Image (cartoon, helix red, strand yellow):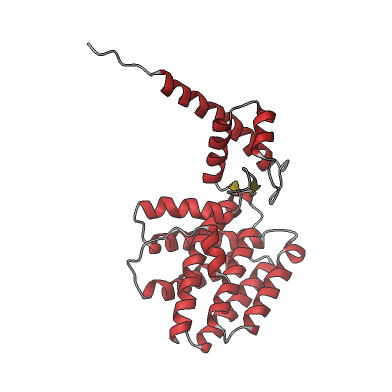
Amino acid sequence: MTTLGIGPEARRRLGARRTAEIVADELRRQIIEGELSDGDLLPRQEVLVEQFNVSLVSLREALRILETEGLVSVRRGNRGGAVVHAPAKASAAYMLGLLLQSDYVPLADLGTALQELDPMCAALAARRPDRAKTLIPKLKKLNDAMAEHIEDGARFTEIGGQFHDEIVRGCGNHTMTAVVGSLETLWTGHLNWWAQETAARGEYPSLSRRRIALRVHTKIVDAIEAGDAERARKLAARHVADTQTYLLAGDPEQRIVALSPQALAQRQR
């Protein structure tokens, strides 16, 4: 009769894994609480091994855990240096994108979610007592930039995405900002891709349609500035639904594709 059990080598690996998770937990805490700032360079692996009193194997496994989470990027060839990355929407959007892509979720499904959530953010923004100082100037500046670049379809779309992102960030609710902001980032990545492709083919929507979109942006800002939450919500809902039709018209069945922070940065150049 065969006895089931874990051999010495397996136990050693499990021990190293548990140790790595403890080290990763501590480094993650330092990053989240700001003890380690975005862009900081972690000490060399030899120093961290001594600091945590762990093996090199456990330390490297801890760094791999954090690298998978997007909290560090290990710089190969420099004896283990790693750069710290504060949690960001792009990373969260990428993880959400991977989840949705693995379930073969259509892009229209994401669009439907944003049709409900974006208008809620606009309404919340209109209720902020400090909106005139904190949010309105930013939105007006973005609208001015859209007007300036109205003949450049790809740039017009990119700035338009920033406008919607600013409303989400300015809604005053941190949970909505994190969740909706991540979904917005995922959608905007696809939208910017579409804008670049259609502009290159000369198929981007006409100037008259761009002017209509810009006028709606102006009305949304006016409603938020006036504190009219219901009007801001209705305008945003209609606008989001209208603009989504352009992206979804080409391929209504297209699926969500996860876009890494690096890919998003590349597309925004």
Above or below 228: residue 87: above
Residue 16 picture location, percent across and down: 52, 27
**Residue in the picture at 60% in, 49% down:** 75
Identify which residue, 63 or 132, lies in the foreground.
63
Identify which residue, 109 or 157, lies in the foreground.
157
Residue 162 picture location, percent across and down: 61, 68
Res. 150 image quadrant: bottom right
**Residue in the picture at 48% in, 61% down:** 114
Above or below 22: residue 83: below
Image side of residue 254 versus residue 168, left or right: left
In the current view of this chain or complex, which residue is farthest to the left? Answer: 1
Image quadrant holding the N terminus, namely: top left
Image quadrant holding the C terminus, namely: bottom right
- Residue 204: in sight, yes or no? no
Identify which residue, 148 or 111, lies in the foreground.
148
Image side of residue 130 versus residue 60, left or right: right
In the current view of this chain or complex, which residue is farthest to the top? Answer: 1
**Residue in the picture at 53% in, 88% down:** 207
| Number of numbered tags placed on the structure image | 0
Above or below 180: residue 226: below
- Residue 126: in sight, yes or no? yes
Res. 51 image quadrant: top right
Residue 263 picture location, percent across and down: 51, 63
Residue 70 picture location, percent across and down: 56, 48
Identify which residue, 80 or 136, lies in the foreground.
80
